[in-house]
Amino acid sequence: QVQLVESGGGLVQVGDSLTLSCAASGRTFTQYSMGWFRLAPGKERDFVAGIHWSGYITDYQGFVKGQFTIPRNNAKNTVYLPKNGLKPGEKAVYYCAAKLFGGVGQLGVAYEYWGQGTQVTVSS
């Protein structure tokens, strides 16, 4: 079993940047593929980005593709989600999720473990 704790969210202005972090504990972090999802008010949960347990494969949802590279630091058991040039529509609770030796999938049901989420609010 693995425990996930997100951090780094907060209230920011339009155009600001921040980096969300997801710290894992419990089992060997390098065995888990990691995903970031977001839940915006009144909307369904969206996949944002993911990284394979090997670190060599990444996947991004269309609305963020090309904007950043999702990094993971295995020495710190942490995966990150950089958010640059934030827009009001990006206000959401951001969750990280993990699956043991799984591929980088966009379906939330494929992930076994979830964090509690971190709120990002973008003020105009």
Image (cartoon, grey):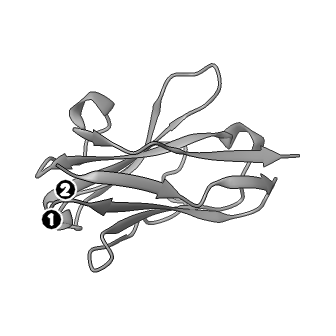
Q: Quadrant of residue 19?
A: bottom right
Number of marks present in the image shown: 2
Which of the pair 26/43 is nearer the observer?
Answer: 26
Which residue is labeled 2 in the image? Answer: 32
Q: Residue shown at 66%/47% (left/top)? A: 120
- Tell me the SS state at disc 1: loop
Q: Is residue 4 above or below residue 18?
A: above
Amino acid type shown at disc 2? Tyr
Q: Residue shown at 20%/59% (left/top)? A: 26
- Tell me the SS state at disc 2: strand
Neighbour tally class for label 1: few under 14, some 14-19, many 20 plus, Cα within 10 Å? few
Tell me the CA gap for discs 2 and 1. Answer: 8 Å
Which of the pair 53/97 is nearer the observer?
Answer: 97
Amino acid type shown at disc 1? Thr
Q: Position of residue 109 (x, y in %)?
A: 27, 28
Neighbour tally class for label 2: few under 14, some 14-19, many 20 plus, Cα within 10 Å? many
Q: Residue shown at 57%/39% (left/top)? A: 93
Question: Is label 2 or label 1 in front?
Answer: 1
Q: Residue shown at 88%/46% (left/top)? A: 124
Q: Position of residue 51 (x, y in %)?
A: 30, 57
Relative to residue 23, is residue 3 drawn left or right? left
Relative to residue 9, is residue 30 drawn left or right? left
Which of the pair 21/87 is nearer the observer?
Answer: 21
Q: Which mark is residue 28?
A: 1
Q: Quadrant of residue 12?
A: bottom right
